[in-house]
Amino acid sequence: MIIGEVCLLTNDVRKLADFYKKLLGVDNCSDDDIHQYTISEGTTLTIYNDGTVKNNQNQNICLAFTVDDIENEYRKVQALGVRIIEPPTKRPWGAVNMSFYDPDNNVICFRQFQ
């Protein structure tokens, strides 16, 4: 079994989808107010407005991405103007992790294994 899709529910599909397109460096040519998706490495990230109002206090989810060059990704994230939780930090097990909030306050973690 593999995870085929992660869906982020939002009040502003365009804003959140545009952020992830820039962050992931992909463009699915979708420009919809209700549903957009990106596919990366076989997993779909869907941005969706199900019609309910979201409070954007997403404290129970963290999306983690493995990256090749965390310093380059850190500069890209800074240029996107997001709030940084933790800059690139080396962990005792050898990984370098960083974390930040997306525009809807979902926690995103980038990690580079060395």
Image (spheres, rainbow, N blue to C red):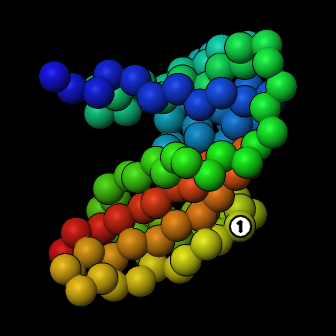
Image x and y of residue 64, in percent: 40, 52
For the residue carrying disc 1, how many other residues have a C-alpha within 10 Å: few (<14), some (14-19), or many (20+)?
Answer: some
Image point (71%, 62%), residue name? 82
Relative image position of residue 11 (x, y in whole percent): 80, 28
- Answer left or right for 90 relative to 26: left
- Mark 1 highlights which residue? 83
Q: Position of residue 33 (x, y in %)?
A: 78, 16
Residue 29 seen anywhere in this rendered image of the structure: yes
Return the residue nearer the eye: 23 or 64.
64
Judge whether 33 appears above or below 86 on screen: above
Q: Residue at x 50, y 35 (%)?
A: 26
Image-based side of 82 in relation to 21, left or right: right
| Residue 22 seen in this snapshot | no
Label 1 SS: loop
Which image quarter holds the N terminus?
top left
Q: Looking at the picture, does residue 110 appear above or below residue 22?
A: below
Viewed as shown, does residue 34 lie left or right of 99?
right
User: Label 1 sits on what residue type?
Assistant: Arg
Q: What residue lies at 35% left-to-right and 65% top-to-bottom?
A: 111
Q: Residue furthest front?
A: 60
- Total marks drawn? 1
Instruction: Give the residue displayed 32% in from the left and 22% down from the top.
Output: 4
Which quadrant holds the C terminus?
bottom left
